[in-house]
Amino acid sequence: MTKQMGIVRSEFIEKTGLIAQNQGIPRVAGRVLGMLLFDGDAVAFGDLARELQVSRGSISTSTRLLEDRALIKRLTKPGERQDFFQLAENPFPNMLARVQQEMARAQADIQASVAEICDSRPDVKARVQDYANLYASLSASVQKAKETL
Amino acid sequence: MTKQMGIVRSEFIEKTGLIAQNQGIPRVAGRVLGMLLFDGDAVAFGDLARELQVSRGSISTSTRLLEDRALIKRLTKPGERQDFFQLAENPFPNMLARVQQEMARAQADIQASVAEICDSRPDVKARVQDYANLYASLSASVQKAKETL
DNA sequence: TAATTCGTTCAGAATGAATTGAACGACGTC
DNA sequence: GACGTCGTTCAATTCATTCTGAACGAATTA
């Protein structure tokens, strides 16, 4: 017995909400993304609010966040007053690009510290450098993952 | 004119606190890790609380977290009543191992949804599968980064 | 022009996580 | 045995973030 598709859908949307949250993205934004990802086609602003049962203010904020990250795009339809949203063309590489940037930023921050450690403390410098290398390595790997996709 | 080493050290510790926070680890835990990373040698429980200016309860919680993740190790010294903490042997691979696990878990969660999508919706299935693949790819990359270190 | 409906904004409420600090049992010292 | 210090625990507090909902200007319709 296979599960009702509506159930599968809403469970998936909840999962995306939680995963987003784990990554520092608000849960509602994650659910919006999940819904657009599942449905594929354009969804009206009002439908997002109604189906996800969140305020329109929340939808406004979330969609802007997702738009800024190039994960979704906003559409308008002639004769329609509402805005519509749809998954962007390559949302996944864009997600990875951002993760990669975050890693690179962490690396740069640490590297700045390394540069300030005086040379008479080679052991300290080495350890902190190792830490910077961790993020350098992560950044590079994510970059690669992005290209692999 | 080079900066005072104490300044460099405390700035570094603050950075590690913030970076930790970005990754979902409590700030205090990040600072503890930063301090042990910078200092290299064993630091007494009481010194962590005093230097970082946080409660001993916080140190207790943070050190347990870091210990569980194999990022630091607890030491005892004969004749000393306090516990001491030191950076673990390979903290960085251990960090990556955990990140990798998190990616794998996200992938598995999504994959479970994919399996429940009925075949009469190939487009939906394909999109959700792509999403799962994102995490699969990330997981693999991080695994590779870990080996590269 | 009045009445809807649209999306945005922002002050405040709600939520959730981190931190404190007091209580506690264990251990060592006097 | 009394006292002091150790690390842990947990209830209460603090803090940051997210979400709501009312107010608003713009656009549309009647």
Image (cartoon, coloured by chain):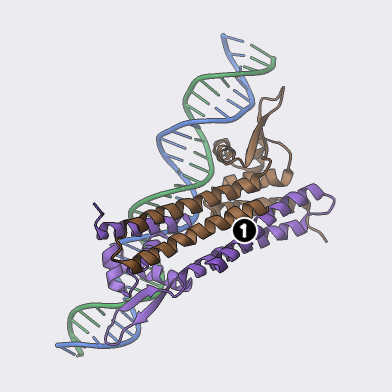
Chain colours: A brown, B purple, C blue, D green
Q: Chain of mark 1?
A: B
Residue at 76% x, 59% y: name it.
B115
- Residue B141, quarter of the rendered image: bottom right
Q: Is residue A77 shown left or right of residue A27? A: right
Residue at 48% x, 67% y: name it.
B92
Q: Which residue is mark 1?
A: B138
**Quarter of the image where the N terminus of chain A is located:** bottom right
User: In this picture, is B139 found above or below D15?
Assistant: below
Callout 1 amino acid: Leu
- Residue C23, quarter of the rendered image: bottom left
- Please state which of residues A39 and D8 is positioned toward the viewer in this rendering: A39
User: In this picture, is C28 found above or below A133?
Assistant: below
Estimate the x, y position of residue B103 in percent, counting from the top left. Answer: 60, 61
- Please state which of residues B128 and A114 is positioned toward the viewer in this rendering: A114
- Please state which of residues B91 and D4 is positioned toward the viewer in this rendering: B91
- Residue D10, quarter of the rendered image: bottom left
Q: Is residue B142 shown left or right of residue A107? A: right
Mark 1, secondary structure of its residue: helix
Report crowding for label 1: few under 14, some 14 to 19, many 20 or more residues within 10 A (C-alpha): many
